[in-house]
Amino acid sequence: MFQLAANAQQTYQLDIKKSKILWDARKTMGGHYGYLLFNSGSLSYSAGGEPMGAAFSLDMNSMKSTDHNPDGNKKVDDRLKTDGFFATVKYPSAIINIKKIMRVGQSTTFKVAGELTMKGITNPIEFTAIIKKKGNIVNAAAETKIDRVKWHIDFQPKPKSWDFIAALTDKIITDEIGVSLNLVFTK
């Protein structure tokens, strides 16, 4: 009986060419926004037809800012890859593991809970998503925020109390990074 239930579960693969993750770190004093690409992803459905879990790998080296001209964006992109920000040489991927997806009433709105691992640091994440399944295609959209400080994205590779300029710059940057997901999965 257990084997029949396991066989009825379905897994949908993320279409990495159609799926987007947008980030926005703007604040009153400026900031940046752009996008990030996926390495891979999948979404599991239960035998009863409910989404139950997901896993994603993000390509941190694909992070691009889009708020300046190409030369300005390249400078921002290069800085984002440094140790004080995302340390992409040491941590080329980030991982999202979604452990719980619960429908809100009879709607297409779901509460989503899991973990995000960036720079080798894992923290819980929670957000609300709209998930719609039609035939062999699943579309999911969500907007949330993450606190960059929890993943040591703090401008300084090794914070120093005496580095006044770096500490001041860190305070000018917003702690919350807005994240928008627009995902397409296929069977």
Image: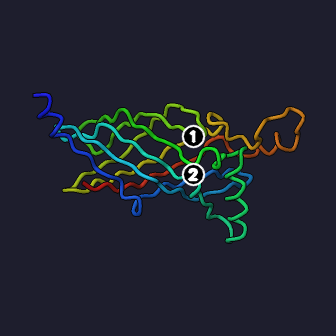
Res. 90 image quadrant: top right
Residue 148: x, y in percent?
A: 63, 40
Going 16% across and 39% down the picture, which residue do you hit?
7
What residue is pinned by disc 1?
118
Label 1: few (<14), some or many (≥20) within 10 Å? many
Residue 16: x, y in percent?
A: 41, 58
Label 2: few (<14), some or many (≥20) within 10 Å? many
Res. 49 image quadrant: top left
Q: Point out which mark residue 159 bears.
A: none
Q: Label 1 amino acid?
A: Met
- The colour scheme used to paint the residues is rainbow
Point out the residue furthest to the top here. 1
Query: Mark 2 vs mark 1: which is more N-terminal?
Result: 2
Going 68% across and 71% down the picture, which residue do you hit?
69
Determine contact: label 2, label 1, CB under 8 Å.
yes
Going 38% across and 54% down the picture, which residue do you hit?
183
Residue 77: x, y in percent?
A: 67, 59
Instruction: Classify 71 as above or below 168.
Output: below
Q: Could you tell whether 117 is left or right of 153 in the image?
A: left
State the SS at label 1: strand
Number of labels in the image equals: 2
Q: Could you tell whether 135 is left or right of 101 in the image?
A: left
What residue is pinned by disc 2?
60
Instruction: Classify 133 as above or below 150.
Output: below
Instruction: Classify 147 as above or below 36.
Output: above
Is residue 13 or residue 134 the one in the foreground?
Answer: 13
Q: Could you tell whether 7 is left or right of 161 in the image?
A: left
